Amino acid sequence: MAPAIPASMDRPHFIGIGGAGMSGIAKILAQRGAQVAGSDAKDSATAQALRDLGVTVHIGHAADHLAPDATSVVVSSAIRSDNPELAAAHERGIPVVHRSDALASLMDGLRPIAVAGTHGKTTTTSMLAVSLGSLGLKPSYAIGGDLDAPGSNADHGAGEIFVAEADESDRSFHKYAPEVAIVLNVELDHHANYASMDEIYESFETFVGRIRPGGTLVIAADHPGARELTAKISGRYDIEVVTYGESKDADVRVLKVNPRGLTSDVTVMLTSGKILTFTVSVPGRHYAHNAVAALAAGVALGLPPHNLASALGTYTGVKRRLQLKGEAGGVQVIDSYAHHPTEMTADLEAIRGAVDEASRVLVVFQPHLFSRTQELGAEMGQALALADASVVLDIYPAREDPIPGVTSALIIDAARTAGADVTAESDQAAIPDVIAGMARPGDLVLTMGAGDVTDLGPAILTRLDR
């Protein structure tokens, strides 16, 4: 039986319903029997997937999209105060609910696993959702990306476990009360909301403080920021802290990561001293570590480690996380969501380890957010030096207004200083021809970034096929 729907969520209206986080919550509520409606700036496959569930989806934003009997309006931090539907909600006295509060209400009465960290949240949450599902546990889940089709970022399951991606960007992960929490890493990002590492640590401490008494924190042993956080919460005696990684003092120790093309074999020693080897069907050391974090979290819930390790091998990836888009003219095109220097470096190193020495790695990179580029543009440029050649697009603004003097040139200059071969290109429509002029059989093209650069993959393949 589905958990009861809060009265405020009986007939909710979502502003920006096509977004990764919003669409997942809307889907689960619809599956639980709520009468869900919403709007988005443009139509999409995700919007259609919601319509297929009986959700009313309006295209564009207008006050009259808000139904007279709406019980709440759900918003994310990206919705501006002058949105006409939000203004109408305030005028009519309809409760406005933040996305994180709506998600938190879906977890009531269940056993939540919340996955946090600056990088790797979507992958780790997906690994848990897929592996728990393959074990027949029927978890509910809400992920920041699609597993295999539009609308597959969330599901209402009949089981007692709820796996959720916990977003630190706007401190919304403070709303959750997980039985098990994962912290993959702790770094400074989201510069519009965090001014320093001290603020980041304070935010993650608050998140850890939300773990239910008797619950478990699974946290990286190798990452400096995560180790610092572990030290800061050392006085919390009502939860179990399980560290994982290659460090000799890790509770769940990674003994070996053996890359095999686009997969890896991972050998770990559990807290019991038992040694397990299992396969991760995505390349790269960082994805292997994500799988180990998922394993440790499942064990904390009482699942048999051997069964869970085997189940993790059924995970084959999530859209935009080193997702193979296809091959044409002997050139593979892979899509990467990486937009922070650490993520860019990890994905480029993973691809390097998966291709032949004779193969070149070509990157089409789209910076994401003016604030992030202002703070980390130099590091982004240094990361691009790992590619054989790169094309850098204009900054994707998302929710931000331009910042004077902040352009892609910050990245390009830093990349060239680091010895990288970089080309600037403002016209996305020109990219397929640019890449066709650069690529040769055996090369690999990586479209990289959190914006609409992902749309270029099919166009590049079509052009290469000619």
Image (spheres, rainbow, N blue to C red):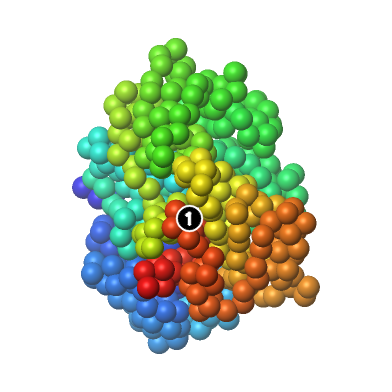
Q: Residues within 10 Å of mark 1 (few under 14, many from 20)?
A: many
Vertical order, 339 against 121 (above or below): below
Q: Is mark 1 on a helix, strand or loop?
A: loop
Residue lying at 33% horizontally and 35% vertically, measured from the top left: 313
Where residue 432 appears, x then y in whole percent?
48, 72
* Residue 32 visible here: yes
**In front of the other: 301 or 458:** 458
Residue lying at 23% horizontally and 69% vertically, measured from the top left: 52
**In front of the other: 269 or 219:** 269
Where residue 220 appears, x then y in whole percent?
57, 32
* Residue 129 visible here: no
Residue lying at 67% horizontally and 75% vertically, measured from the top left: 401
Vertical order, 391 against 168 (above or below): below
Residue lying at 36% horizontally and 28% vertically, measured from the top left: 278
29 left or right of 1?
right
- Determine which residue is flagged by label 1: 443
Vertical order, 38 against 296 (above or below): below
Vertical order, 377 against 215 (above or below): below
Where residue 27 appears, x then y in whole percent?
32, 61
Question: How many circles with numbers are drawn on the protein?
Answer: 1
Given the image, on which type of amino acid does mark 1 rest?
Asp
**In front of the other: 409 or 162:** 409
Where residue 211 appears, x then y in whole percent?
51, 36
- Outermost residue to the top: 273
Viewport quadrant of the C terminus: bottom left
412 left or right of 303?
right
